[in-house]
Image (cartoon, helix red, strand yellow):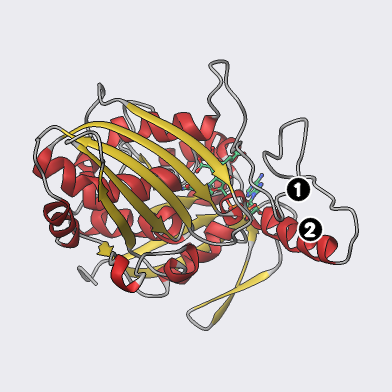
Amino acid sequence: MTNDKQYNVAVVGATGAVGQKIIQYLEEKPFQVNNIKLLSSKRSAGTTITFNNKEITVEEATADSFNDIDIAFFSAGGAVTERFAPEAVKSGAIVIDNTSAFRMDENVPLVVPEVNESDLKNHQGIIANPNCSTIQMVAALKPIQDAYGLQRIIVSTYQAVSGAGLDAQNELTNQTKQYLNDEEMTAEILPAGSDKKHYPIAFNALPQIDVFTDNGYTKEELKMINETKKIMHEPELPVAATCVRLPVFTSHSESVYIETKESNVTVEEIRKTLANGSGIIVEDDPSTQTYPTPLSAADKKEVFVGRIRKDLDNNNGFHLWIVSDNLVKGAAWNTVQIAQALVKNELV
Ligand code: NAP
Ligand code: 3JM
């Protein structure tokens, strides 16, 4: 708790994978919640969700939902944000948005508190939460950027199905059962709900997250590339990304290659720099087979780093394995941390 003021909050997408986690973290009292309004589409309106042992009825989100709201958390897809976030701001609320709708808007701070909390002071009503894969990578790389500078990032991701919503999680469960029962697997959602073709994710690996763009990269890959440059305030930093979906329920993993500006940095120095970083836990010891995995990182708020190695050919190159719960630090917890920072800095 940072001050005595009480805040009225709304959660748009309260019945979804991200929304449910936001509600869970608000119960931990990151700041004082006076009233909470839980919003969804017509489909879930009328159902109830428990908040602090009280049953709250979920309401359909409309333009009028935001009167008297101080902070509105949005995680119901880009179209819902585009439709209602400006209305919420007009009603006097600050919007913290989990979708990609406004992330690259120059008037919208894109924030990971451990990396660029000070960008919050420029907000004009909407603050964007970065993509889950971006958040864990920049959180881990920030201390390295500060200490040694960065001159290149190349990342390959190994992403969990929970990043694609509750329906995608159910799809993995159902396909797993079908496969083990020798039945044909039905694929209707992944790799991208809105795309023409769907492939099974169970016992598979799909090198497509979100839809393709004209240059051959997927939108998820471009989110990682562009958001990283914006958050790290390095528009010219070379960043390349390949994003892959795996049959893992929770936590994204990333194999990240970086080149530092400074030469002759040692693995021990990188390890120490990371261990001193905020919200980072180093789990790295080949002698005891210690490294993070999706299961070990699940439900944790931190970003875990292991397999730290120096490149064998490039003196400035390092390889890292970065794992974090995509619905926690990758979405809900980062969102709630942003709200907490707004309260702490008296920006709300
Ligand atoms: P989900 O499990 O499919 O939940 C979607 C939520 O949106 C549900 O609460 C749904 O309500 C609600 N919704 C759908 N249409 C709506 C409408 N017209 N009006 C109001 N509410 C509506 O999805 P999720 O995984 O929670 O993700 C939600 C969004 O968060 C994604 O679309 C994405 O933009 C963003 N996201 C961001 C990150 C990140 O990296 N930061 C990660 C994951 C997701 P009903 O129950 O009524 O259907
Ligand atoms: C993660 O607008 C939509 O249909 C949501 C697509 C989506 C996004 C997004 O672009 O907001 C699904 C899952 C994200 C994200 O965090 O970028």
Q: Position of residue 330 (x, y in %)?
A: 42, 53
- The tally of labels here is 2
Numbered tag placed on residue 333 in the rendering? none
**Mark with earlier residue (2, 1):** 2
210 displayed left or right of 333:
right
Residue underneath mark 1 = 200
Q: Position of residue 230 (x, y in %)?
A: 29, 31
Instruction: Say above or below: 261 vs 29.
Output: above
Residue 239 sits in quarter? top left
Nearest the eye: 192 or 28: 192
Residue at mark 2: C-beta within 8 A of ligand 1 = no
252 displayed left or right of 193:
left
Nearest the eye: 82 or 331: 331
Residue underneath mark 2 = 175
Q: Secondary structure at mark 1?
A: loop
Instruction: Say above or below: 260 vs 167.
Output: above
